[in-house]
């Protein structure tokens, strides 16, 4: 995650980043797991941008990527 005022990042670049669906804090994601835990403690998916509600997924945010819990799940890893 990156703070908007962080030195060295242009506002144009920051506007292209996906943002937390709850607090709108931008996130930098290069590869790896698409599960993001924001500084505001919101779990969300970088692939689809939606909040991951643990209570709806057996208290496991990784179930967002599991077809047994979600129809048409997102891809968990981005490489």
Image (cartoon, grey):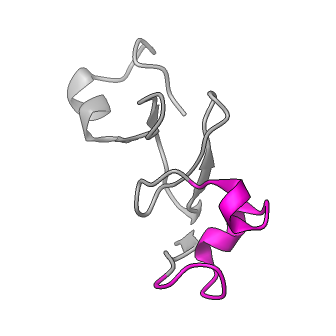
Where 12 sits versus 74, above or below?
Answer: above
Range covered by the magenta-colored residues: 52-72
Where 74 sits versus 40, above or below?
Answer: below
Image spot of residue 17 (x, y percent): 34, 41
Query: Between 63 and 30, which is closer to the camera in this rendering?
Result: 63
Where 70 sits versus 43, above or below?
Answer: below
Image spot of residue 68 (x, y percent): 66, 88
The residue under the point 66% across, 62% down is 56
The residue under the point 58% across, 55% down is 52
**Relative to 50, 40 lies left or right:** right
Question: Quadrant where the N terminus lies?
Answer: top right
Query: Between 70 and 6, which is closer to the camera in this rendering?
Result: 70
Q: Does residue 60 show up magenta in the picture?
A: yes
As drawn, the residue found furthest toward the right would be 59
Q: Does residue 42 show up magenta in the picture?
A: no
Q: Count up the numbered dots.
A: 0
As drawn, the residue found furthest toward the front would be 56
**Relative to 17, 11 lies left or right:** left
As drawn, the residue found furthest toward the left would be 12
Image spot of residue 7 (x, y percent): 43, 13
Image quadrant assignment for residue 39? top right
The residue under the point 78% across, 67% down is 58
Image quadrant assignment for residue 21? top left
The residue under the point 46% across, 84% down is 72
Image spot of residue 65 (x, y percent): 60, 75
């Amino acid at each position: 995650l990156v703070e908007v005022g962080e030195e060295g990042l242009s506002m144009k670049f920051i506007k292209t980043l996906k943002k937390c669906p709850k607090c709108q804090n931008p996130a930098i994601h290069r590869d790896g797991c698409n599960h993001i835990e924001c500084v505001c403690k919101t779990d969300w998916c970088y692939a689809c941008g939606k909040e991951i509600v643990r209570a709806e997924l057996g208290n496991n945010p990784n179930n967002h990527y599991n077809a047994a819990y979600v129809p048409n799940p997102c891809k968990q890893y981005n490489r």
